[in-house]
Amino acid sequence: MSTNQPVAERQLPPHEPEPLIRTLALARRYHMGKSAVDALRGVELAVQPGAFVALVGPSGSGKSTLLHLIGGLVRPTGGEVWVGGLELGRSTDRQLVVYRRDTLGFIFQSFNLLPIKTAWENVALPMMLAGVPAAQRKRQALAILEQVGLGHRGDHRPAELSGGEQQRVAIARALANRPRLILADEPTGNLDSRTGGEIMALLQRLVRDEGLTLLLVTHDMGVAGYADRIVHLLDGAVQRIEVVAAPRNEARVTGSAPLGAEVREL
Ligand code: ADP
């Protein structure tokens, strides 16, 4: 084997990092009886580590399908989806389980907390699956709850918490195994606008401070404005990618400003 690197590799710009996510002609077709629906048709997307990307588009444009493909929950019917060094379409079920456990954190619109567990127990669940010893779980879970501003609520059950607090617990749970990538599906969809803004500011801070990569599906342009890239999907294809020059930031927005406000266009 030659030790010479291919010319193309040597000529890459020195500070351009490898994308964490790369899709190549990514396609997903669903069959419904005799008809077929092309939910995604040839998506080319690269997401750099540390990026905060919002996926927007009308209902049915393929946002959830793309998120689920990157989450290893749905398999492509065409093309490739790479996360780190793994091509998810060709991975085994076992590889996908390990990938989801070690690389990803999921955040959902409906929080999806276990009602009979306390906040810290909910956060500790993924740690249990990853084999963290019982003695360490509570301490680590409480430390992460502290990080999301809920250190004082560790022993509360979800029903004893507000919607915003429940979503903070869900965010803490998503962080439990120190993932590189957070996938969020309408994380503010069940929250009032002020609480939604607080959650977005928290996610934005986690991306910046922890070096996480965040991919978020939303139909709300106010929410998308917290991201530094907005990917517009239409009919299963990327219509355009918007670079947000000055992402929305709660510190610069008055407390009562509603989500759904303007997004800065380049
Ligand atoms: P969005 O999240 O933007 O609303 P989706 O990815 O959910 O879009 O859906 C894209 C298209 O794929 C829609 O036409 C939808 O009906 C179809 N679709 C999504 N999931 C399935 C499925 N499991 N079976 C059949 N069709 C599906």
Image (cartoon, rainbow, N blue to C red):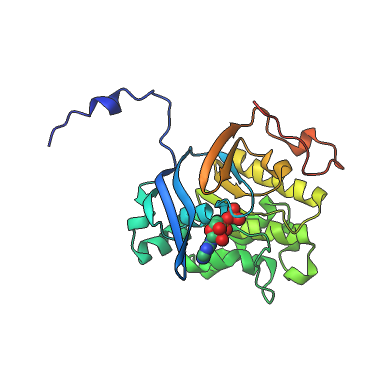
The picture quadrant where one finds residue 138 is bottom right
Q: Which residue is most to the bottom?
A: 116
Q: Quadrant of ligand 1?
A: bottom right
Q: Residue at x 77, y 35 (%)?
A: 251
Q: Residue at x 77, y 61 (%)?
A: 163
Q: Note whether 98 is above or below 159 in the view shown.
A: above
Q: Relative to the observer, which residue lies in front, 76 or 99?
A: 76
Q: Which quadrant of the structure image shows residue 153?
A: bottom right
How far across and how far down the image is residue 26, in percent? 42, 48
State the residue in front, 69 or 101.
Answer: 69
Please say if 12 is above or below 57.
above
Q: Quadrant of the C terminus?
A: top right
What is the number of callouts on the image? 0
The answer to whether residue 259 is left or right of residue 56 is right
Q: Residue furthest right?
A: 256
Where on the picture, by quarter, is residue 170? Answer: bottom right
Q: Is residue 82 above or below residue 15?
A: below
Identified at 76% across, 35% down, the residue is 262
Does the image show residue 249? yes
Along the viewing direction, whichever of 14 and 89 lies nearer the viewer: 89
**Residue 156 can be seen, yes or no:** no
Q: Is residue 82 left or right of residue 221?
A: left
Classify residue 160 as left or right of residue 235.
right
The residue positioned farthest toward the left in the image shown = 1
Q: Name the spot of residue 161 as percent of width and height, x first.
A: 78, 65
- Residue 71: image location, x then y, percent: 49, 56
> What is the x, y in percent for residue 67?
53, 53
Position of the N terminus, as image quadrant, is top left
Q: Is residue 56 above or below residue 71?
A: above
